[in-house]
Image (spheres, helix red, strand yellow):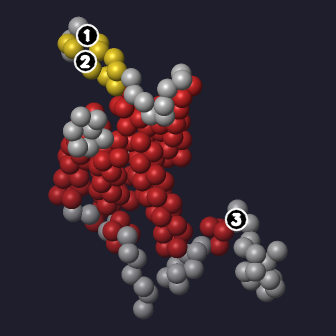
Amino acid sequence: MSERPRRPDALMPNQDRPLILETTIKIVFHSILVLALYFLFAGHNHPGGGFVGGLMVGAAISLRYLAGGVEAVQSTFVLRPHLILGIGLVISSLTALMPVILGNSVLQHGELDLHWPLVGEFHVTTTLTFDIGVFLIVTGLVLMAFEAFGADFDEVVAGGSSGEPAPEADAGRPPVAGAPSSEGGAGR
């Protein structure tokens, strides 16, 4: 008897998933993203911030994964996960180090009061910039995790019920030192 796959989308192909699950996740997904943005923007004055906002995006991505599998996660964002993470790291690093370049201490924040015609008074600090960087780092990391684990699971399922990866899954990977090669000897 073959071992059951553990991923929900492998258990239920798209046409067999309950309609209520897909419909609910479509509604809740966007609501969670709005809540994540609220946490991001309110975080420097109240509980929340970039990390909590990024975790909320991670929760939304988890729901997206349940509804559509790794393909749905990969199609959620235009940019690749490592690029999102890298942009967030650059933003956070620059925000932390820019005060040092200007002769101040690390992470010293600046403030700016703006008046926008439609919005009114708007108070901005560099803490928000740092939080945006952290938000992008956490979001990119969650996306990378789902892509990596989802892709590995797809390779195992494609290989059959033995649990061994499909032969084409290892085609571009270098051999591991000490691992047996296909010729029966030790790896390179």
Marks 1 and 2, the one that precedes in the sequence: 1
User: Quick check: can you spot residue 107?
Assistant: yes
Q: Nearer the viewer, mark 3 or mark 1?
A: 1
Marks 3 and 1, the one that precedes in the sequence: 1
Residue drawn where x is 81% and y is 85% of the image: 185
| Type of amino acid under label 3 | Arg
Out of 75 and 160, give the one closest to the viewer: 75
Answer above or below: position of 106 versus 183.
Answer: above
Indicate the quadrant containing the C terminus: top left, top right, bottom left or bottom right.
bottom right
Q: Which residue is mark 1?
A: 115
Q: Is there CB contact under 8 Å for labels 1 and 2? A: yes
Few, some or many residues within 10 Å of mark 2 (<14, 14–19, 20+) = few
Out of 112 and 54, give the one closest to the viewer: 112
What numbered label is drawn on residue 22?
none
Residue 168 location in percent, x, y? Answer: 65, 68
Q: Which residue is mark 3?
A: 173
